[in-house]
Image: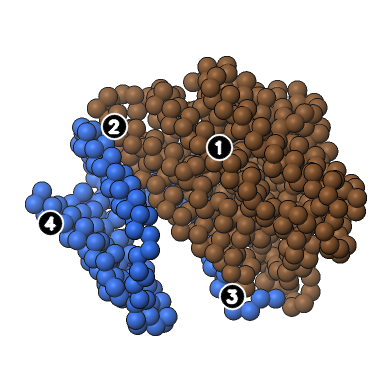
Chain colours: A blue, B brown
Amino acid sequence: MQILFFILGAVALIAGGLVVFQKHPLRSALWLIVNFFAVAGIYLLAHAEFIAAIQVIVYAGAIMVLFLFVIMLMNIRQPEADPKIPFIGRKLAGIILAGFTGLILIYGVTKATLTTGKEMAPGLGNTETIALTLFTDYLLPFEVTSVLLLVAIVGAVVLAKSKLK
Amino acid sequence: MTFTIPSFHLSSIGPWLTLTVTAILILVLDALSPKGRKVCFSWLALAGLAVAAFQTIGLWGSTGTDFARMVYIDDFANFFYLIFILGAALTVLISRQYLEDYGKNMGEYYALIIFATVGMMLMAAGSHLIMIFLGLEIMSIAVYVLAGLFREDLRSNEAALKYLILGSFSSAFLLFGMAMLYGASGGTLFLNDLPLRLGADPAMAPLVLLGVGLLIVGFGFKVAAAPFHMWTPDVYEGAPTSVTAFMAVAVKAAAFAAFARVFFLAFPAIKVDWNMVLWVLAVATMTIGNVAAISQTNIKRMLAYSSIAHAGYLLMAMVAANQLGAMSLLYYLLAYTLMNLGAFGVVILVGRKKDSYLNIYDYSGLGAAHPVLAASMALFMFALAGIPPTAGFVGKFYIFSAAIQAGYIWLAIIGVMNSLVSVFYYLRITVLMYMKPAEADLGPVVFSPALTAVVALTAAGVLAIGIFPGCLYNLAMNAVKIFPGL
């Protein structure tokens, strides 16, 4: 199990890196799919079957297809020419800050001694447990999410509507 | 398998429901109304806000939680509800004429303002970090879109894109912090449970600190605290002026509501740790905001830096972390809503059609041409600078005394020195208005009834709560009784 985790983690990291370093947006998007699948595998290892399935269906499936459609419709063939790196200092500062933040995160997480998580309630599958909490304790956040989606839809229409009054 | 949904009372989230229904009603009416026929969406929005305000007053005094402990019902939330409703109502009033000049007086604008207000209410009343995050996202997404409302204007596009990208980044920080806390607490995100669970296991201390640090980044971005303030001037300048006013007061108030609630309620035990971070942030925010504001010639940009500086003063109240500090946060945010919205109302009036005159030198000679308008602008500038007898003075007085009471003498001294710096650029507007002749004839100022009403109301409000702060003091003091750790 542990070996599997490390393999999946390595795949996720490498694919993530490749997403950033690819010149062509289409390739970035394809590497992102690999990353999503690797992360879904890690969810599976953590016994979060439902999240893993959702990750594959929603992210690797629906959202990435949308991404690819947008990239193809916008017809970005040629990546823009590399600017002459005018802000070498700024880049350096960014790298140092990001590296520092990463170090703090790694230090913090490794310093803490983690206990094993709680066992799932017996007799209930993963999906059932999520459904149960979603419609009882988390009822209000669940309903509020619909408002969030509505706002996002209205916002997208406002920004993308072809003709204004 | 049987399961029971915990009982709940819809009345405890009455204001949210009213506003959500209002916003949806506006959208539906907008879609159904025949082309070319004007529906008065602004009146509908105001009516919804008024009903929500009445419901909030009806909730006053009740305490407890509802919806399986997901939402707090207390006066802290109610007080902030009223600030948000006031901010949204004044924004709706200053928007109508302004948007009509641009041909953008559409229903979606008002719907998004109302939706953003709902999100803010969630942030003020959420008792679970998930609720606070959802509220933050509802508010932010609505405001991202509002910032980019003028699609033909490149600067509006820039504002929306900058705010969206940096805002989502900061949301990710916030969420990451919450995840850390979830792990450290052994699986709870209820603000009430967090203090006990976080202290239970010392081995988790690094994770807790990590989580708190990431939360500071996320909230710091939303309140525009240095060094997370870089987006503020560009976004405030590029966004439509009415939206800028809304962002400067209501969004900031909502972020501070959640910031204060989470930190005062969940992390009083590790106050020493986050206090020092916030101390540095407060000093940096005040100083950067005030010093950068001096050299601005665009009034919107100047007010943007001024709003950064005010975030610094408000962070001072967070650092103090005592009853007086929490109270001053509430009082100051209300005062700031009044004085800043008033100032933006004047900016829209003086800007005339389509923001033609936003340079501060366009204000020269205003004192002779429009004495009343100039007088109210001078009043708002005095209030923002913190000169008695305005609300700004009383608010700063409370904040500084809270800092001194908590033993942060140097912080208070730096705050006072910063206030002195700020007097320079606020008074410069006044000097221009009264002591310089008008440079050119800019044409008449069109006083629309709604805008005039806003300027008059906020001017009266700034004076009223500045001269008689006692009643508000008691209300706010009662509201912050909910923090046992202070």
Disc marking residue A7: 4
Residue B112 on image: x %, y %: 62, 58
Q: Residues within 10 Å of mark 3 (few under 14, many from 20)?
A: few
Look at discs 2 and 4 and give the one toward the viewer: 2
Specify the subunit that label 3 lies on. Answer: A
Cα separation between marks 1 and 4: 49 Å
Cα separation between marks 3 and 4: 45 Å
Name the side, left or right, on which A130 lies relative to A146. Answer: left
Look at discs 3 and 2 and give the one toward the viewer: 2
Q: Are marks 2 and 4 in contact (CB under 8 Å)?
A: no
Q: Residue A18's image quarter? A: bottom left
Are the numbered discs 2 and 4 placed on the same chain, yes or no? no
Cα separation between marks 2 and 4: 27 Å
Cα separation between marks 3 and 2: 48 Å
Amino acid found under the numbered disc labelled 1? Thr
In the image, B322 versus B181, the foreground residue is B322
Of label 1 and label 2, which has the lower sequence position?
Answer: 2
Q: Secondary structure at mark 4?
A: helix
Amino acid found under the numbered disc labelled 4? Ile
**Residue bearing mark 3:** A161
**Residue bearing mark 2:** B206
**Residue bearing mark 1:** B287
Specify the subunit that label 2 lies on. Answer: B
Q: Residue at x 29, y 64 (%)?
A: A20
Q: Secondary structure at mark 2?
A: helix
